[in-house]
Amino acid sequence: MTSDLEQLLQEAQADPSAPEDIADRIYEAEGIRFLLDKFGDSVLHAADDAGNTVANLTARWCQTDEPLQLLSEALSSAGWSVCEFFTNPGAENACPLHCAAKNPSIAALQWLMQLLGAEYLRSPDASHCLPVHYSALYQCPDALELYKREAGLSIFEETTSRERTVFHCAAMNESADNLRWLISELDGEGSFLVARDISGNTPVHLAAWCQDVDTMELLKEHLGEEMFDLSGEDGETLAHSAAQNTQSGEVLAWCIREMGPERLATADCWGKTVTHRAAENQTAESLQLLFEALGRPCLEAVDSSGRSAVHYAATNTASDSALRWIVDLLGPSCLVKETDAQGIKPVHLMARHLDTEALDYLDSLDYRLVFRTTDRDGRTLVHYAAENELCRDMLAWCVSHLEDPMWLQEEDLFGKSPLYIASGRKPEYVIE
């Protein structure tokens, strides 16, 4: 069903006098003015398919407060309550303040605070997040100063339904500026920095996952060596979190230098090591550093499911350099010899997660061995290729390397063939 907002936009786009790209400009002053002139009060009622009101959408995307002022004037002219309009919840029980807190510009947030005062700053959305949590995650210290001025420092102690504080949120911000500001204002003793969310993660773990080395140095200044012994979700260490930082390998390199071999060799409650996480998310450079610190055992260690580093590298969609590095070190045979508790081999995971270029590693192996290698359920590489998002290309690669295309109809122990699996995902590819 088409939303009322979409219907208005379709009509607006058909109007020759509409601003160019009106659908992309409805949160600018020119777009709002045109819609109000053309449709009047109906614009104020409009919402998108998700239930987001015009007030929410404008607060989320406007770059100045002028569009909000235009809506306010239209409301006053229509005899509506301006405050009620700008506090009505939309999708996920979020009101315009929540949406404004996700806007990189703080203009909308500042305008709404001046209109509404401090009362609505503690209104939670469906996730029990307050606007301040979103500002810590998406905005800058200037936004946090607004909260301090309107509601006092106590608002920074509020938690979400996941028991996350603004420190957790700031630790996931692209910039360390919010975290630095919060530390200077609230956390002289570091207690907020070691508070755990419902998963067991502290802001320190989230910062290792999302930020850079400068942030880690800042945290070390306040927490000292204690931070290296903090356990997070599933008993993961700081280095586990750093190994999942897909923006850069520098934080993991810093952890390797700072933490020492004993801490780096620690496994989480599932037996996953830092090397496993690095193989899954990082490049060859990170694995080389871990190898130099821990030696060959780090590549041989298996988790509780029986998977080693080469299994994890076979699922690394960010970079195939980790897999290349391990294969160069251990030899191509590790792709068909390493077996987890389900009988799954790295070659199976490669076919499920990677692309055809990655399968070039198999050129030095006997293809008959590769294709006959099954897991515990009788599934071959071709079955796994049929589960790949790129199943068309993967199955085409398999056909070009198979001596007998009937492999596509080979059934596993549950009676499912690669063609059957592919037909459930991309039926048009099977027909082709």
Image (cartoon, rainbow, N blue to C red):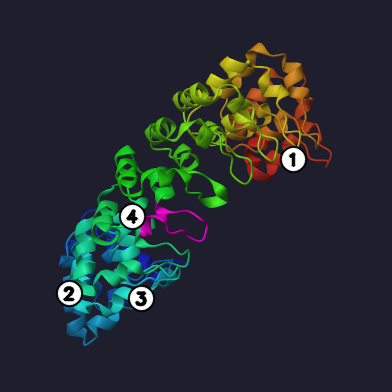
Task: Quadrant for residue 131, please give it.
Answer: bottom left
Which stretch did the figure color magenta? 190-203
Q: What is the number of the mark on residue 148? A: none
Q: What residue is disc 2 on?
A: 114
The mark closer to the camera, 3 or 1, is: 3
Amino acid on which disc 1 is placed: Tyr
Q: CA distance from mark 2 to mark 3?
A: 16 Å
Q: What residue is disc 3 on?
A: 123
219 or 432, which lies in front? 219
Q: What is the number of the mark on residue 420? A: 1
Above or below, comparing residue 283 to residue 190 in the picture: above
- Residue 196 is a magenta residue: yes
Residue drawn 47% across the image and 37% down it? 243
The C terminus, quarter of image: top right
Q: Are marks 3 and 1 in contact (CB under 8 Å)?
A: no
Q: What residue is disc 4 on?
A: 170
Is 81 left, or right, of 416 in this rendering?
left
Residue farthest along the bottom direction in this orientation: 79
Nearest to N terminus: mark 2 or mark 3: 2
Amino acid on which disc 3 is placed: Ser
SS class, disc 1: helix
Amino acid on which disc 4 is placed: Ala
Is 81 left, or right, of 413 in this rendering?
left
Residue drawn 78% across the image and 23% down it? 372
Amino acid on which disc 2 is placed: Gln
Nearest to N terminus: mark 4 or mark 2: 2
Q: What secondary structure is the stretch in magenta mostly built from?
A: loop
Nearest to N terminus: mark 3 or mark 1: 3
SS class, disc 4: helix
SS class, disc 3: loop
